[in-house]
């Protein structure tokens, strides 16, 4: 069995489109769990009426990305757990390709499908969002997404190891979950899957990309509108990720780079564009690591 888990936050129509794409799959043994992360309007009645096969969980508090997904774990029974964003749709055969790769690669800890941006029309060529990732640099705290913005003409055809899975669509086995544990909730938004992949690798497992499995992503219908909250959480989570996984000289190198390059560059850019709201959000993200008063989360 595959347990498919998604989190809904004020985007019920998109979640319904995802559920419709799941219904079109032919994988024989699936359960679907929808966690509503404190949406303004409770969509329970709609899901229970239109999608009676779905297990619905309502949280009265926004638990963030990891917290919302983790809420489904106590209800999930699958041997594999597939976490997918509610603003995505599964291409035909996606689940079969992911499950088969797990069966072929006994040391695999997590796998993501290839993720493409949702096309403007049925005839449009798919444009790639994710076909793997490089490792995070200890100097800059940055990494690159392989294949980003390329047209998909079959150049990524074979499964392979990669540095990180993509949080928009990632599958983990129950055995690995039991050994490594769930996503850490301390980030609230961003970097959760990178942190999880680091822990999975530290436990001796590999991260894979399966390009034959595809997901179409409408790219963050909610987060794209967040503005200052997005700036705050990206800044805060980037530094927090580096603190958790880069120690000693590597942490010192990153702090030097961030202090001498990233911090003044971002500050100057926001000042020059007159974007003082995002300037304050950026600095709050930085100061959250030094002052408890700066750790209060943005409302999302």
Image: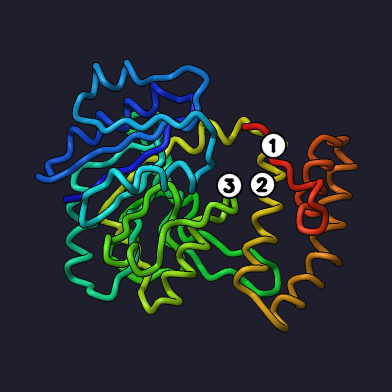
- Would you call the spot at circle 1 few (<14 residues within 10 Å), some (14-19), or many (20 or more)? few
In what quadrant of the picture does the C terminus appear?
top right
Callout 1 secondary element = loop
Mark 2 or mark 3, whichever is nearer to me: 3
For label 2, the residue is 233
**Is 38 situated left or right of 209 in this image?**
right
Q: Are marks 3 and 1 in contact (CB under 8 Å)?
A: no
Residue shown at 35% from the left, 21% from the top: 44
Residue shown at 58% from the left, 64% from the top: 143
Q: Are marks 2 and 3 in contact (CB under 8 Å)?
A: yes
- Would you call the spot at circle 2 few (<14 residues within 10 Å), some (14-19), or many (20 or more)? many
Residue shown at 17% from the left, 43% from the top: 30
* Sequence-wise first label, 3 or 1: 3
**Is 28 situated left or right of 133 in this image?**
left
Query: Residue 29, position in %: x, y?
Result: 12, 45
Q: Is residue 230 above or below residue 95?
A: above
Q: Are marks 2 and 1 in contact (CB under 8 Å)?
A: yes
Q: What is the CA distance from the residue labelled 2 to the residue labelled 1?
A: 8 Å
Q: What is the CA distance from the residue labelled 3 to the residue labelled 1?
A: 10 Å
For label 3, the residue is 188
Residue 48: give its label. none
In the picture as drawn, the residue positioned furthest to the bottom comes out as 249
Q: Is residue 250 above or below residue 222?
A: below
Task: Identify which residue, 119 or 113, lies in the foreground.
Answer: 113
């Amino acid at each position: 069995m595959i347990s498919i888990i998604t989190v809904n936050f004020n985007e019920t129509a998109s979640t319904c489109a995802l559920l419709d794409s799941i219904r079109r799959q032919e994988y024989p043994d699936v359960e679907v769990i929808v966690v509503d992360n404190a949406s303004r309007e409770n969509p329970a009645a709609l899901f229970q009426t239109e999608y009676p096969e779905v297990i619905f969980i309502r949280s009265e508090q926004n638990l963030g990305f990891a917290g919302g997904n983790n809420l489904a774990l106590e209800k999930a029974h699958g041997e594999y757990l597939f976490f997918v964003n509610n603003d995505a749709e599964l291409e035909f055969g996606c689940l079969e390709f992911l499950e088969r790769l797990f069966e072929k690669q006994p040391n695999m800890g997590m796998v993501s499908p290839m993720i493409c941006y949702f096309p403007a029309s049925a005839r449009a060529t798919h444009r790639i969002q994710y076909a793997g990732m490089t490792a995070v640099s200890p100097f800059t705290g940055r990494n690159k997404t392989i294949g980003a913005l390329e047209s998909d003409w079959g150049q990524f055809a074979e499964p392979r190891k990669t540095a990180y899975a993509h949080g928009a669509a990632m599958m983990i086995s129950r055995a690995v979950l039991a050994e490594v544990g769930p996503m850490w909730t301390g980030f609230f938004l961003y970097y959760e899957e990178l942190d999880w992949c680091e822990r999975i690798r530290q436990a001796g497992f590999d991260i894979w990309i399966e390009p034959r499995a595809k997901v179409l992503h409408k790219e963050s219908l909610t987060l794209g509108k967040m503005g200052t909250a997005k700036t705050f959480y990206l800044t805060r989570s980037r530094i927090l990720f580096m603190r958790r996984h880069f120690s000693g000289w590597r942490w010192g190198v990153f702090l030097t780079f961030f202090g001498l390059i990233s911090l003044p560059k971002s500050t100057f850019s926001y000042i020059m564009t007159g974007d003082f709201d995002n300037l304050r959000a950026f600095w709050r993200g930085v100061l959250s690591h030094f002052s408890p008063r700066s750790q209060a989360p943005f409302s999302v």
